[in-house]
Amino acid sequence: MDEIVDKMLQQTQDWTVNDEDPGIVHNENPYLRLLVENSSLKLLQESKIRKAFKDQGSLGLFRLFVTNSFMNAIRTWTNYNFKNKGLKEVNENKFLAYVGLEMAMSIVQLNDISYYWKTEMFTGHEDFKRTMSRDDFMNIRANIDLRDPESYNHDEASADPLWHSRKLLEHFQKNISQLAVPTGTSALDEASVTTKCRSKARSHMPSKPDKYAVRFYALVGTKNAYISSIVDNRSGNYCNENGPVSFCRVFREMRTPYNDFLRESNMVDEGSPSALWILQMAQQTKIARDPSGKRVFFCDNFYTRHTLASELKRITDGEARLCGTVKFTNVDATNRPNLTQGISMLKDAPRGSWKLIRAYNKTPNLDVLKRKHAAEQRKKPSSERSAFVAPTELVAEKAGYIVWKDTKVVVFYTNDLCDTPSTAILDMYDDEAKRCVHGLAPIERWTGNESLHRSIFMVPAIIAAYNMFMNSVDRMDQRGATNPTRRKEQRLHMSMFTFIMDLAALQAFALHQVIDDGSNVLDFGSFKRSICESLVMPHRSKRKRRTASEKENSDSMENVIGTVGDSDGHLLIETINKTGIHCHFCLLRGIKKKTIYGCTKCGRGFHVNCYSAVHFQGALKSDPRAFADMILSTERPFPRGMNKKSKYVGDISTLTLT
């Protein structure tokens, strides 16, 4: 044990510690440094992207991924539903304002949609109220359609659980591949759409935060978290075409590589998910070759296979490489014996130990050899029979497994070794093993003996690279999770709509990071808020002008005829059938005179002038004699039987105009 520790301490002398932050170890490994330097985002239509940002800012970048024409198509399909229900159709500005409010709900998060329009304390939001009424918002949300309602096909809808969102998904897929492509390093992992709907598209993954969700295979660049490809996992899809064929239908340029390589492959099934993953990664090379001549894709043990890596390297003419952790059940029969031996050798080894296992390619006639061996074994007694051992004649070029002892044994695979191992198993102290894995690099781990800082272990650079670049999809999810447009939604197409809107905002932000010259540094929350503001302002400004105009017209009318309630409900109208009743003010002054007018609230008769004197006393201050007469009259007692309301004075409903 002491010998191992001394050797590991000797290896750490080639690494420096940052003086500003002693807890951060800076490695100078050439392999890692090149991966970092070569990782970037190449803009395929740079002039178009810069013009969109110059003309419309963040909204212009957003519209590159969900174009204005497609938004108008969704509005047309939505208006079709409005028309069938007898509702008023929505115009372009109003529909875009709805989209902006839908996305803004991720920035201002309340538990229920109705809360945004409430007036109680701690509820409601003025920007939502001033932009659109709740009824208009809910009507659009209830009738939104992501494809032509007249194109419904029962067989298609029964076979494809995402039939309602397929056009939107394909529209987004094409746009992201035409605008930019990552270079250097990328990561392949799952992206999830959480929904409460009951759909065959949902799949169960207990290890994920969202255990039940619609899963997508997302290929994300490590530099700016730009998605270069995203495809659903076709859960519950019973269409005639499989995943790879569907991918080639959307991206026609991939049909030739698929037909020439994967259909004839003896390592990967042409209709398997592995073939789909190969097409997703190979598409980057098809769009634009990497300036460095090499792309490295990182993935977890759900995807990593030697057969997949071999076919990926072959279809990309040697440009694409694979690196990731390995699930033992996904290891092919050719490499399983040596890998099993390497794992058993590290079972009781100290933490930080590792071994390099050479990888072998699958023999083309392996199935024939298996059947021949089985036939020979049936002829032998059971005591003399032996298991089939795959031939290891075809050594894979610069490919191997790294078995590393952490808290438990972890297996990594890569076909991006510096050199091909000369023997089946190489020990960690062998200079050839260190050279093959591109040298050693430090990683930090808690061992249980530390107090403030983690212990540093020197591991193969392949493992350090995996730790650095594998979390690209997680970083994208983390960035989106700060402002997720997520509802308790039971309609899957609405979950898909908000999911694509969020991804479009994330993609636009990735482009903004590339073209920004440093004068307008924004975080993702501020960037998304600016998109929402640009979407709602055209409709909101028109709504403000219309409201101001209506108020001005209302004020001018009030100036002419007054308003109901200026005298707190006191109105002077004719009595029922013009019946004459005593004037209340005249009785106060000791005069018995009748009138055909009465006050609706007082219930008593008044002459026109008497009504004004009683209800608008301030107007009499200019006539001291009349004002004094009115004050004195209120002090006189009522004649007997006269201090009661008249039944002949009606209310506002009895008012008739002649």
Image: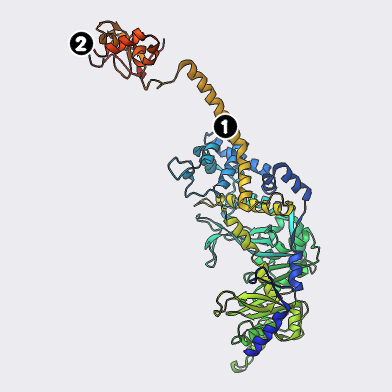
Q: CA distance from mark 2 to mark 1?
A: 58 Å
Quick check: 196 above or below 74? below
Seen in the image, is 567 located left or right of residue 157?
left
Which residue occupies the extreme left position in the image? 640
Q: Amino acid at mark 2?
A: Pro
Which residue occupies the extreme front position in the image? 624
Residue for badge 2: 639
Instruction: Tell me where residue 303 appears, x and y as whole percent.
Output: 65, 69
Q: Look at the image and tell me in which quarter the N terminus lies.
A: bottom right
Residue at the location (74% across, 48% down)? 49
Q: Look at the image and tell me in which quarter the C terminus lies.
A: top left
Quick check: 363 above or below 225? below
Seen in the image, is 183 located left or right of residue 242?
right
Instruction: Tell me where residue 630 appears, x and y as whole percent.
Output: 31, 11
Residue at the location (62% across, 36% down)? 538
In the picture, the disc for residue 326 is none
